[in-house]
Amino acid sequence: MAPSQFALLCALTSSLVLLAGIAILWRHSIPAYIDSFARQSFFLALATLVVAAGSGTRELYLVAALVFVVKVLVIPRLLHRVLGAVRADLEVHPYVNVPFSLAIAGLLTMAAYAVADPVMALSDHPTRSGIPLALAVIFVGLLIVVSRRSALTQIVGFLVMENGIALLAVLAAYGIPLIVELGVFLDVLLGFLVMLVFVHRIRETFETIDVDHLRKLRH
């Protein structure tokens, strides 16, 4: 693969990961959030495959397979199952409305380019054009966490942030050692399962998964 084609494919797949994250912000349906996360994870696996093919790093093929199995198949299926149990399909009153959320996402993307500019200047990897896009994915994930009230949506935001961090690691350093990747996957799975338990407890206690009701615990 020619270096220019490799760089172009890295930028294209990274852009798809970012767009799938931003798509979450203009929807109100929690099932649509979960589907967008699965779609984003698929693009992340695709980006990892592109870097594996371009860099010749065999471990990245295994990482791409793990991303596909865990984040495209397993986690979305678990989220849909929990969603069916708590019966809360809509993000009714987000802290930040859709138009303003999209405007903030645009500003965060520009900020990501400004933050990543010194790193891109120092890097000689052909993947460097995707670094600001990976940073923007992290920022968008954080925006989802702080701007939405549903506990399930906040879990999706956390997972979007983790996708951004994984993409950044793959692009900035041509991947990290496989044992570290496996440790990260294990941490994400454990954290994800703990958060699902909290969602069930919130639902049982308040008969809703709106995190605003947690403020009652202060009194």
Image (spheres, rainbow, N blue to C red):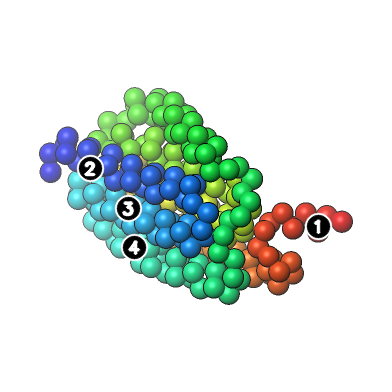
| Residue on which the image places disc 1 | 216
Mark 1, residues whose alpha carbon is within 10 Å: few (<14), some, or many (≥20)? few
Disc 3 residue type (three-letter): Phe
Camera-side mark, 1 or 3: 1
Check residue 9 in the rendering and tell me which mark sits there, or answer none. Answer: 2
Query: Could you tell which of marks 2 and 4 lies nearer the N-terminus?
Result: 2
Query: Could you tell which of marks 2 and 3 lies nearer the N-terminus?
Result: 2
Q: Quadrant of the C terminus?
A: bottom right
Q: Position of residue 130 (x, y in %)?
A: 33, 38
For this rendering, which residue is in front, 128 or 195? 195
Tag 3 secondary structure: helix
Q: Residues under labels 2 and 4: Cα distance?
A: 19 Å
Q: Residues under labels 3 and 4: Cα distance?
A: 9 Å
Disc 1 residue type (three-letter): Lys
Tag 4 secondary structure: helix
Q: Residues under labels 2 and 3: Cα distance?
A: 12 Å
Q: Position of residue 187 (x, y in %)?
A: 51, 60
| Residue on which the image places disc 4 | 68
Query: Could you tell which of marks 2 and 1 lies nearer the N-terminus?
Result: 2
Residue 183 visible in the displayed image: no
For this rendering, which residue is in front, 25 or 180? 25
Q: Residues under labels 1 and 3: Cα distance?
A: 40 Å
Asked if the residues shown at circle 1 and circle 3 are in contact, with their CB atoms under 8 angstroms apart, the answer is no
For this rendering, which residue is in front, 64 or 31? 31
| Residue on which the image places disc 3 | 43
Judged from this view, the residue extending furthest toward the right is 219
Disc 4 residue type (three-letter): Phe
Tag 1 secondary structure: helix
Camera-side mark, 4 or 1: 1
